[in-house]
Image (cartoon, rainbow, N blue to C red):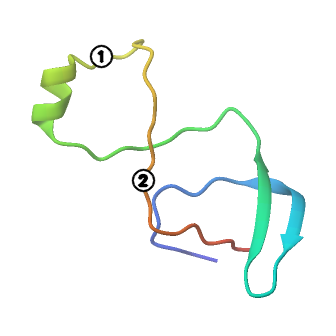
Amino acid sequence: MEISARNVFEGKIENVELGAVMANVKIKIESPQLVTAIITKESVEKLNLKPGNTVSAVIKSTEVMVAK
């Protein structure tokens, strides 16, 4: 399967909670993982980002899809 999403994390389902309409699916992500962030050059310079820095990857999304 191919998908255009850049941040795809492989993992195993730990728990499924079914509601009347929606379901909560907990997926355990195995590490190490590599997250690719596409950000502006201005942000890199402003934050002085360099290899070896400790940073947080904050992923914003309006939805998370599950593929099997």
Q: Position of residue 66 (x, y in %)?
A: 68, 71
* Residue at 58 percent of width and 58 percent of height: 8
Is 1 in front, or is 14?
Answer: 14
Query: At label 1, which amino acid type do we have?
Result: Lys
At x 62%, y 38%, the residue is 33
Rendered position, 23 above or below 30: below
Numbered label attached to residue 50: 1
In percent of the image, x 52 and y 74: which residue is there?
3
* Residue at (42, 22) in percent of width and height: 55
Q: Quadrant of residue 12?
A: bottom right
Query: In the image, residue 25 lies at what x, y percent?
Result: 78, 65
Q: Quadrant of the C terminus?
A: bottom right
Measured as percent of width and height from the top left, residue 17 is found at 86, 68
Q: Nearer the viewer, residue 61 or 32?
A: 61
* Residue type of the residue flagged with mark 2: Lys
In front of the other: label 1 or label 2?
2
Mark 1 surroundings within 10 Å by alpha-carbon count, few (fewer than 14), some (14 through 19), many (20 or more) = few
Image height check: is 22 above or below 9? Answer: below
Q: Secondary structure at mark 1?
A: loop
The residue that disc 2 covers is 60
* Left or right of 15, for residue 57: left
The image's mark for residue 18 is none
Label 2 crowd bin: few (<14), some (14–19), many (20+), radius 10 Å? few
Cα separation, mark 1 vs mark 2, equals 22 Å
